[in-house]
Each structure stands twice: as C-alpha cells, then as structure tokens.
C-alpha cells in the first residue's frame, strides 16, 4: 500500500493529526526507528528522515 502523503522531516520525533476538520484524527506522536521512516497508523502519512538530518 502506497502512503497517502510523504513528509520529509529533520527530527526523530514527529506529530500527526491527519487533516484539519472532520477528516482528521487524534494528535499522536511518532518516533522514527533506525530505518528512518514511519507511517501514521491512522491516516497512512509517511514520515522520512532527511539525509542531512
């Protein structure tokens, strides 16, 4: 399954709340593992650590 959206980040801890309004989900915090990427279990957004970080 392809992620809905890919977001490049510079920190190992990120937060996600889906989208604004009714289609959002509860605010959660995710920690990127050694692989450098993590998917939100609610909305499927993929967070990837930038190589420069």
Image (cartoon, rainbow, N blue to C red):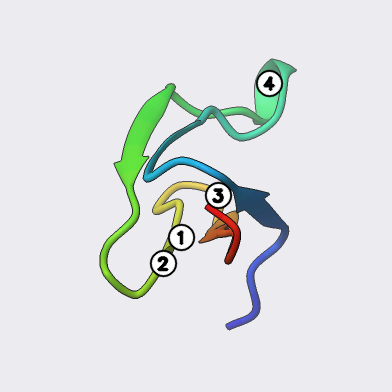
Q: Nearer the viewer, mark 2 or mark 4?
A: 2
Q: Regarding mark 2 in the picture, which secondary structure is present there?
A: loop
Could you tell me which secondary element the residue under label 1 belongs to?
A: strand
Which residue is outermost to the top? 21
Instruction: Measuring from the top left, give residue 46's x and y in whole percent.
Output: 57, 60
Say above or below: 28 vs 47.
above
Residue of label 1: 39
Residue that carries the numbered disc 2 in the rendered image: 36
- Which comes sooner in the sequence, label 3 or label 2? 2
Residue 41 location, x and y as percent? 39, 53
Q: 19 or 14, which lies in front? A: 14
Q: Is residue 53 above or below residue 20?
A: below
The residue tagged 4 is 22
Instruction: Give the camera-side residue of 51 and 20.
Output: 51
SS of the residue at dot 4? Answer: helix
Q: Which residue is mark 3?
A: 43
Which residue is drawn at the image coordinates 37% and 45% (left, top)?
12
Q: Residue 18 is drawn in which quadrant?
A: top right
Mark nearer the viewer, 3 or 4: 3
What distance separates the C-alpha of mark 2 from that of mark 4? 30 Å
Residue 34, percent across and down?
27, 69
Outermost residue on the bottom side: it is 1
Residue found at x 59% / y 47%: 9
Image quarter for residue 6? bottom right
* Residue 29 appears left or right of 22: left
Q: Quadrant of the N terminus?
A: bottom right
Q: Nearer the viewer, mark 3 or mark 1?
A: 1
Question: Which residue appears farthest toward the front when viewing the image?
Answer: 52
Q: Nearer the viewer, mark 4 or mark 1?
A: 1
Alpha-carbon neighbours of circle 1 within 10 Å: few (<14), some, or many (≥20)? Answer: some
| Helix, strand or loop status at disc 3 | loop
Q: Is residue 34 left or right of residue 12?
A: left
């Amino acid at each position: 399954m392809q992620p809905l959206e890919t977001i490049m980040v510079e920190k190992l801890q990120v937060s996600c709340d889906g989208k604004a309004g009714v289609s959002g989900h509860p605010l959660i915090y995710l920690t990127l593992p050694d692989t450098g990427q993590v998917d939100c279990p609610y909305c499927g957004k993929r967070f990837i650590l930038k190589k420069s970080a």
